[in-house]
Amino acid sequence: MKELNTSRSQALHERAERLIPGGVNSPVRAFRSVGLRPLYIARGQGGHIWDVDGNEYIDFISSWGPLIIGHSHPLIQEAITAELANGTSYGACNEREVEMAELICSFFPSIEMVRMVNSGTEATMSAIRLARGYTGRDKILKFEGCYHGHADSFLIQAGSGLATFGQAGSAGVTAQTAENTLVATYNDLESVRRVLDAHAEQVAAVILEPIMGNMGLVPPQEGFLEGLRALTSERGVLLIFDEVISGFRAARGGAQELYGIRPDLTCLGKIIGGGLPVGAFGGRREIMECLSPLGPVYQAGTLSGNPLALSAGIAMLRQLGQADFYERLEAKAEYFEELIRPVLERYADKLSYNRIGSLSTLFFRSGGVASNADAKASDTGLYAEYFRLMLAEGIYLPPSQFECMFLSMAHTEEDLQRTAQAMERSLTKLFA
């Protein structure tokens, strides 16, 4: 285990702190919860990244999910380069928008029409406005620990960065916004029923991560998603799946394919840009036709459908559309789980492990994790120590207990073996 020299990263962060709040442009990058200062990444290739000091790491963040075929994939690079030769943005319609819409609708049968935006936050924010406009109702229902971006409506008992820093909400969110955001417990259908019954004909939509990915990975329990679909349909409430993380990760058609549930609206992001900034939301035709210019719900974006981002995303989705892609990805994820199973069993009284497809989380608590409350009971101090030990081994993990590990197709058997060995050494040292 080598001592990392991170002097250039430290110098860059000192400069950044003078000009950028906290020195970071997204809070989870701050590394504060793991007792470090952030690394500054210079480049990525395949399943590896290098920081500005030249340290090499096996990367299990994958830009928080979208790099499912690895960093700097030649087909993505070629697509961007070819599109760049034509220009960067036109503020007008372009052919890539149509191609991307066709691909998304072919992957997700529940999506009959789709609109491109620039981020996952923009997608969820727009989907909520559309749901309110379509139903004529004001309130939305979300779940404790589910994170849907940083729009005001979603920063009530959210997960991800807010959970990392121990915040239940955010300053700047108005009381009226909070009043119209109702909260239920993930994997608890009765909590949903109680809220919907208490606010009869006032709730426009229920929004959730069908597979919770922003409190660490927490799968839906059997019958939960089916029950949600039934409850919302009975009450005229739209069901919105935020598949920014699970879309194209849990399965070709996301969690809705994996569990056989058809939501009314779906939010996507990250992966459909091949790593470039992008988002989308789509769903039933009669709902989507309420958007301007066809309907009264206004939504716009100068850079929406940016040809560079969509060219990268089209190249990505064509790779994912290969007949055996998800079988090969699942085999890789199963192989890694088999490698680490002995150490998980050895420390079963201290750890829990959840995995769906290429998404997984190691929780520092025993007894399994099936809810936000379970995840929050994890020992974040131990996770911070584990993170530091793994980083010194050259393994780059999420700098928070409340995030997923993202396996990519670019991770080799050697990468996974090295990671499993580093994991065993780190956990043995931690629990010695």
Image (tube, rainbow, N blue to C red):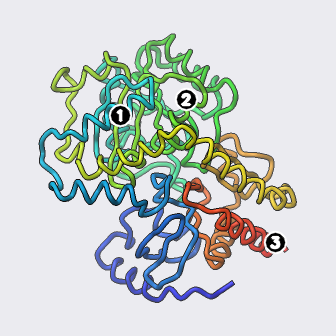
Local SS, label 3: helix
The nearer-to-camera label among 1 and 2 is 2
Q: Amino acid at mark 3?
A: Thr
Q: Amino acid at mark 2?
A: Glu
The residue at which mark 2 appears reads as 257
Q: Quadrant of the C terminus?
A: bottom right
Q: Which mark is residue 281?
A: 1
- Position of 267 with respect to 229 (left or right) is left
The residue drawn where x is 48% and y is 76% is: 50
Whole-number angstrom distance, CA of label 3 to CA of label 1: 45 Å
Instruction: Return the disc, 1 or 2, that comes first in the chain's sequence.
Output: 2
Q: Quadrant of the N terminus?
A: bottom right
Local SS, label 2: helix
Image position, residue 409 (x, y; %): 56, 54
Q: Would you place residue 37 above or below residue 141 in this image?
A: below
Q: Which mark is residue 428?
A: 3
Whole-number angstrom distance, CA of label 2 to CA of label 3: 39 Å
Q: Amino acid at mark 1?
A: Phe
Instruction: Return the disc, 3 or 1, that comes first in the chain's sequence.
Output: 1
The residue drawn where x is 55% and y is 34% is: 255
